[in-house]
Amino acid sequence: MRIHPFPTLVAACVIAFAAVFPATAKTPPADQAADVVAAFHATLLGVMKRADELGVKGRYQALAPAVDEAFHLDLTARQSAGRQPWKNASPAERAALLDAFRRWTIGTYANQFDGWSGQAFVDHGQTPGPQKGTVLVETELTGKDPVTLIYLMVLKDGRWGVYDVLVRQGTTSISQLAKHISEFNGIVKKGLPALTDTLTAKTQELLTD
């Protein structure tokens, strides 16, 4: 797996979360959030072990259902695009972006998790998140260069799903949501379709063997 450095912006993500996802009055047990992460990791690890056999397109197909079940990509995509571009877009443009963001997310996992050399995912427990209706699930991907993965889980439509992933390796921390916001900021100034086109092109590159 390849990790790309980016400064962490956890505070910004917390504010962004509060804006797009109001507090939930009732939440299921936190261990259900951890179960979602564990199930996703089980699929991801299996794909890593069969990476060469599957190829990048096969990994994409194998990971797609697991990503759909584990993530709330609609929330993440909306926040990543920004309030004003989302507001200015038509329903069709919004739907197109959500589809492109989903494909790009799955493609990124399929491209980056491209092999296995004895790694394992280790659960380090969960804690209450920054807002009501959120949980932080901390895990570690073991190996020569261990990576800490902290999942910000949110409750929506009666299920826990990933809203952001905080990646820590050595002294480098990455908030995936903050990274998206930073990278997309210049593109969405041209409108939501420009971001959709960019993500579609990136996905095609990711899925090229």
Image: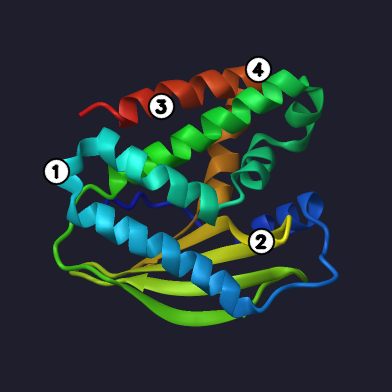
Question: According to the image, label 4 marks what residue?
Answer: 190
Point out the frontmost of discs 4 and 1: 1
Is there CB contact under 8 Å for labels 2 and 3?
no
Q: Of the two numbered discs 2 and 4 on the same chain, state the one appearing first in sequence.
A: 2
Locate residue 84: give its quadrant.
top right
Residue topped by disc 3: 202
Determine contact: label 2, label 4, CB under 8 Å: no
Image x and y of residue 100, in percent: 53, 28
For badge 1, the amino acid type reads Glu
The Cα atoms of the two marked residues, 4 and 3, are separated by: 17 Å
User: What distance separates the C-alpha of mark 2 from that of mark 3?
Assistant: 30 Å
Closer to the chain start, of discs 1 and 3, is 1
- Quadrant in which the C terminus is drawn: top left
Residue 74 horizontal side relative to residue 201, left or right: right
The residue that appears at 43% across and 65% down in the rendered structure is 39
User: Regarding mark 3 in the picture, which secondary structure is present there?
Assistant: helix
